[in-house]
Image: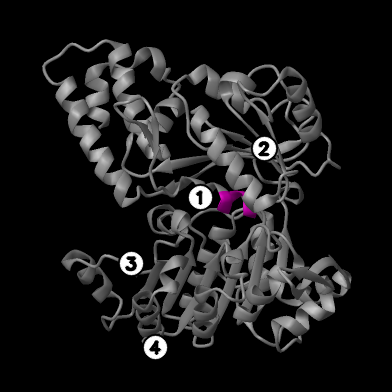
Amino acid sequence: MINYKFKTKPYAHQITALEKSWNKEVFAYFMEMGTGKSKVLIDNISMLYDKGKINGALIIAPKGVYQNWYDTEIPVHMADHIEKDVVLWKAMINQKQQTELNKLFKSSEKLHILVMNVEAFSTKKGLDFAAKFMSCHNTLMAIDESTTIKNPEAKRTKNIVALGKYAKYRRILTGSPVTKSPLDLYKQCEFLDEYLLDYGSYYAFRTRYAIMRSANFGGRSVQVVVGYRNLGELSQKLEPFSYRCLKEDCLDLPDYVYTKRVIQLSPEQKKLYQQMKILALAELDGKQMTTQSAMVQLMRLHQITCGHFTSDDGTIKEIKNERLDALVDILSEIENKAVIWAHYRHDISAIINAVEKNFGADSYVTYYGDTSNEDRQKAIKEIQDPNSPVRFIIGTPQTGGYGITLTGANTMIYYANGYDYEKRIQSEARINRAGQTRKMTYIDIIAEDTVDEKIVKALKNKMNIASKITGDELKDWI
């Protein structure tokens, strides 16, 4: 291990990951969510910079994650002695943003770090800027949640794989490298090095590891995958350039960790949120508001952050939003079973549709007001059964947050939080009780710069918002 002064103390498994990878040109961190793969990458970048191997880093992550690298991961974990310019890519380039981007090309001894969202690589503007950045630096290029480049036909996949050839070092990070099939690995590994898996094309790779048969669709014959083979051989090929780490293998990790997935409001949400904010502030001005009245204003703003609102005629209208995409990204990265809590019944339907579309009709059960007593008992049994195909239980803390045991899952996702501290604590305890043998992760999906942030903060401070918030407090929040 090289001599390096860590800013935050690493766990044993993080040291192992760095020992295996730090000076290798290509490497895959297949580390389960909650094991700290972001810190490992940041330490790896720092080590290479200290040794004079790189002076630039391009970190690519999904839209719901990439800002967290800029706001939290790099400031928390990168060593203080490293002088750096860190810039977050934004598609809308105003004068202020242009000034930030220009920092990346100033001649200096600093480490230059560009953080971009993976979706930007479907655009010429994003691709051209990343290429310009890499042409000016000895770069480490890293893909966080690398299953986002698993699709061989996707424009962003092709662009990122092609761009990767110009990086001095390449890294991929994901908790679950195989989301639906072993074939997902091909493009992720091709980004690292096209010769790693010994197959010159995706189709040759598929022939070796997938069992195919012909099927007729609309009068034409197509090849479909019906099974897999030679998976032991595939695992052996991955071993030299990857490190696999599950939470249950990390004995020094805390029993549970809290993390968040930050999302931005869509343009439609921003517009509605601002309008509702102005109305709410007008209501709050010059009035001594009751807690109940304040809660009505809070709920209207909160609903917009969740992607819907109630119109004047009482119907619920959908708004384009990132929250569902963020949830699907999280679920794709999770290895074991998970509990998904929603606050609004309307969101339950949207979550069910997204989970069914992405993971199949047999991947989930429900536990909320519309779930019959018989189906509730069946849901608990399925989530507790390690051999059941059910991976997710979708419900509300109002219904499922009390009394039941869900220790078959060790990840809990709050799609949106309620306002009652008691319900939050009780719902958390469903996976944290006798019979839980694994490390647990709690994830809050939070819309940035909205009441969403204040709600989570208040709950963490043990405030029962539903009975304590006043008009003045809400005014401060918004």
Quadrant position of residue 341: top right
Mark closer to the chain start, 3 or 4: 3
Q: Nearer the viewer, residue 466 or 86?
A: 466
Q: Are marks 1 and 3 in contact (CB under 8 Å)?
A: no
CA distance separating discs 1 and 3: 22 Å
The residue that disc 2 covers is 255
How far apart marks 4 and 1 lie (CA) works out to: 32 Å
Residue drawn 83% across the image and 74% down it: 209
- Residues at circles 3 and 4 in contact by the CB criterion of under 8 Å: no
Asked whether residue 442 appears in the rendered view, the answer is no
Q: Mark on residue 87?
A: 3
Residue sitting farthest toward the left: 286
Crowding around mark 3 (Cα neighbors within 10 Å: few <14, some 14 to 19, many 20+) is some
Percent across and percent down for residue 458 are: 40, 26
Main secondary structure of the magenta stretch: helix
Separation of residues labelled 1 and 2 (CA atoms): 25 Å
Q: Dot 3 lies on which element?
A: strand
Disc nearest the viewer among 2 and 4: 4
Q: Secondary structure at mark 2?
A: loop
In the picture of the structure, the residue carrying the numbered disc 1 is 326
